[in-house]
Image (cartoon, rainbow, N blue to C red):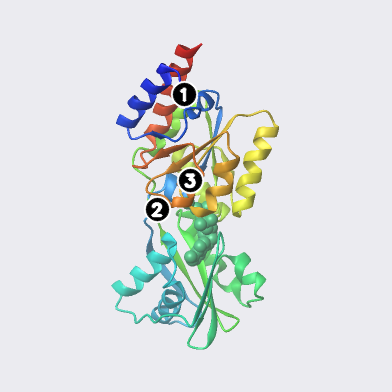
Amino acid sequence: ATPLSILRASGEAAERGILMRSGEAFQLLHRVDVIVLDKTGTLTEGKPHVGAVWAAGGDPEGVLAVAASAEHPSEHPLARAVVTGAAERGVRVTDPEAFTAIPGQGVVARVAGEEVLVGTEKLLAAHRVAGVDAALPWATQQREQGRTVVYVAAGGRLVGALALADRVKPGAAEAVAALRGRGVEPVIATGDHERVARAVARELGIAQVHAELLPQAKRDLVRLLQRAGRRVAFAGDGINDAPALMQADVGIAIGAGTDIAIDAADLVLPGGRLSALAEAHTLAGTSYRLTV
Ligand code: ADP
Ligand code: MG
């Protein structure tokens, strides 16, 4: 039977926008000493916009048109940003003839008869795209500002790159400090580039950063910490976070999230309010003490 104190804590948690998916969740959370946080959509608002466009051939609108057409079917927040950015600039977007999303890397599509890639350096390298180095100085400058850079290739050549700007959630730095105050060490895990992750970590006062992780690598990071004797919570919002959410001692789905993330989680924060993380940890401690 679920102890009364857990029921009470669960009710109190719900009032603060913290939903428990199992009675056990709080008992596990109370022991947690490290929390791995996804960056995009968890620490940041997850509502990026196109901040800048770099074009190899001097035609930024053309780059945006190709990228937005390739991204059109995608639900990924970066894809939504690219499509919206094109619409705002009055750029014409078509539907791709073929489309595949590659989690943690980007999309591969066919637009006007050409193979179009939008995504990471790794994705372009896997398709042997030439000319990626030309964008590096620009990309580095954008990343130092915390912007996510996605490359755009068509017909095997780099045609441009987009810098997507996303804001850190209000109160995120305070939420991180509150967790640390409760003895929970914050760690960032992201599929994004190391430089971007470091820029966000600086802003939030987080020392540990793990970047350029594919979904399985996020899970492996959680496992590694567990093997080192840590009790690990993982907070994330996306499909790409599901394996890590399942592996963690406590999986925390953030915001509206995806159904897959919510199914994989023990706790859900529908509002995505980060200060709820430390509040949940406090409530877990209280309810646990009352049961022993
Ligand atoms: P995060 O771990 O920060 O939530 P993801 O794992 O979803 O991010 O994506 C990691 C990286 O893969 C992104 O920073 C981006 O470079 C690339 N990427 C993923 N999906 C897309 C997409 N639809 N369009 C462009 N790039 C993408
Ligand atoms: Mg995310």
Where is residue 78 shown, x and y percent of the image? 43, 62
Q: For the view shown, which residue lies furthest in the right direction?
A: 227
- Decide if residue 174 is on the left or right side of residue 112: left
Q: Earlier in the sequence, mark 3 or mark 1?
A: 1
**Secondary structure type for disc 1:** helix
State how far apart marks 1 and 2 are (Cα): 26 Å
Residue type, label 3: Asp
* Label 3 crowd (10 A; few <14 / some 14-19 / many >=20): some
The front one of 122 and 292 is 292
Q: Where 148 falls versus 131 (above or below)?
A: above
Q: Earlier in the sequence, mark 3 or mark 2?
A: 2
Q: Is residue 23 visible?
A: yes
The front one of 44 and 217 is 217
Q: For the view shown, which residue lies furthest in the front direction?
A: 1
Identify the residue shown where x is 45% and y is 82%. 58
Residue labelled with disc 1: 181
Where is residue 44 shown, x and y percent of the image? 41, 48
Q: For the view shown, which residue lies furthest in the bottom direction?
A: 113
Residue type, label 1: Gly
Residue labelled with disc 3: 263
Q: Earlier in the sequence, mark 1 or mark 2?
A: 2
Ligand 2 within 8 Å of the CB at mark 3 = no
Would you identify the image quadrant in which residue 274 lies? top left
* Label 1 crowd (10 A; few <14 / some 14-19 / many >=20): few
* Label 2 crowd (10 A; few <14 / some 14-19 / many >=20): many
Residue labelled with disc 2: 46
Where is residue 69 shown, x and y percent of the image? 42, 78
Tell me if label 1 and label 2 are in contact, CB under 8 Å: no
Would you identify the image quadrant in which residue 133 lies? bottom right
State how far apart marks 3 and 1 are (Cα): 30 Å
